[in-house]
Amino acid sequence: MTTPPLPRTLPAWIKALDAVVLPAFADPHARVQRAMRDSSKSMRQIAELIQESPILALNVIREANRSAASAGKPAESLEVALSRIGLKRAEALIAGIPAARPSEIPAPLRQMVLISRHASQQANGLFAARLARLWQEIHWSSLLFLAPVWTLVAAHPELLEAWEQRVLVRREPAPQVEQALLGIPLLDLCVAVAEHWGLPGWIAQGYRLLSQNRRMLIKALHVARDNEHPLHQQQMLDADPELRRWLTLPSNTIVLANGLALSAHHSWSGIHSLRWQRLAGLYLQVPLTELQQMVHQQAAASAQTIGKTDLWHPAQALLWPWETVFQVEKVARLPNTEALTQWRTHCRELLSEPCPYDNVIQLTATACKALTCAGMQRVLLMIVDRRQQRLVSQQASGLPREASRLTLEPDQSQVLRRLLEKPALLRLTPDNVAQFSALLPGALKALFPSEHVLLRSVGQEGRVIMLVVADQGNTAFSETGVQAFTKTVQCIERALATFSKRGR
């Protein structure tokens, strides 16, 4: 059997994405259905329940706006959409949407919806209070801004992985990659889908800003860079009335909110995140430090609303003090004399022949101690389970209790797959963390909220059997620290080789 070719034209893509049926989380889906059968529930109460599920909200708003009666006047809010189609029709619509447990919904789709929820929180917290009369438009437009991408990721998750690998890792130009993968620019596809579905008008307008009106965006970014001199910024805006009028458009808020959420997803301190923060600060006319504090507060509020999840939320990277997160040049201290003595003792034990260990647990326990004595503050050792094709936690130090129960599916991470192909070292630094962050499992990033992490796959005869992850509390590794880590891993490899030959 052969896989049917992907669409290559705009009409073909619209037809393909139109046919995608997105699943909704089972719990909110059931609550909405019960409310619709309850005659005592008002339209507003039902709308509030639907709001818990972005997938359900998308379907209701899309259904209301695609009808002929709504041509030229799309419903900008969920409550208006419900009133337009009526509860009976809405009940039938929601009954036709499949319900699934979170574990049954593909992780790429759930991750994109999480980013949209984070963007909506940023929009509500930063802009809706200042533009109170437009809060409905701001809320729903920011939440559904990435909805065309939801369907694309749900139908073809491999495209997202290919895009991340080529654009974020290999740094190929995004327009060229999109042309190769889709046959058309991604922004053009998003505009067309948003208009075809009749999504709130600000959404298509936002995509046009990013694709067709980049001149204004670049001029605004140039002014925003001078954030420390607000008077000079105001003088520059006064000298360009067209830019000043464009900058204050309410519809720009949803682009700013999604830019903040998407860039923070990769790195809070990356250049893309800084650009969106400066631009939002210019829009709100607040200093950069104040804007960053506001953005971080909204990220924390978003994480609290979403609750515990196996996905990655940028708020997890804000758990560490400001100075340890952003002063990346601070280098970790070297181990003291006593720790180095213990390190040498553990390494000698690992190199002992015959093998002093009766099982792998004893071996990895010594390995974990050696890495800790070498200066690693957080350590995780995972064994490759060949039968179930996954990584299973074996030893942990300096990590929360859940680290001991962690399992990872390498199929869901490009980085893990590459590390398991052959023994290799990946050293995350502030310069490359944005490239690799999206390619790492959220559960692993939650345990190591750092821009300085070492990931080393350990093998025997070319076959990877263990993954070692370690950091020094988000401080930069010294070359001596990296050498100590490397030497310790070499001892672990020797120990594994000796252990495999025992009893022969």
Image (cartoon, rainbow, N blue to C red):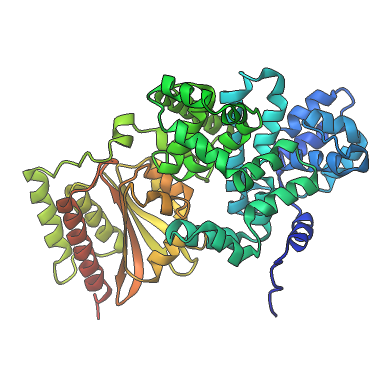
Which residue lies at the image location 70% right of the left edge and 36% below the top edge? 202
Residue 75, by quadrant, is: top right
Is residue 405 among what the camera can see? Answer: no
Is residue 241 among what the camera can see? Answer: yes
Q: Is residue 49 left or right of residue 477?
A: right
Which percent across, then down, holds residue 360?
Answer: 30, 63
Which residue lies at the image location 69% right of the left edge and 24% below the top edge? 135
Comparing 73 with 419, the one in front is 73
Residue 132, by quadrant, is: top right
In the picture shown, does residue 213 fall above or below 163?
A: above
Question: Which residue is situated farthest in the front direction here?
Answer: 239
Which residue lies at the image location 84% right of the left edge and 48% below the top edge? 96
Comparing 228 with 466, the one in front is 228
Q: Which corner quadrant holds the C terminus?
A: bottom left
Which percent across, then down, holds residue 481?
Answer: 18, 51
Which percent across, then down, holds residue 414?
Answer: 47, 61
Residue 321, by quadrant, is: top left
Which residue lies at the image location 10% right of the left edge and 55% below the top edge? 344
Q: Is residue 493 left or right of residue 238?
A: left
Q: Is residue 234 left or right of residue 421?
A: right
Which percent across, then down, holds residue 25?
Answer: 69, 43
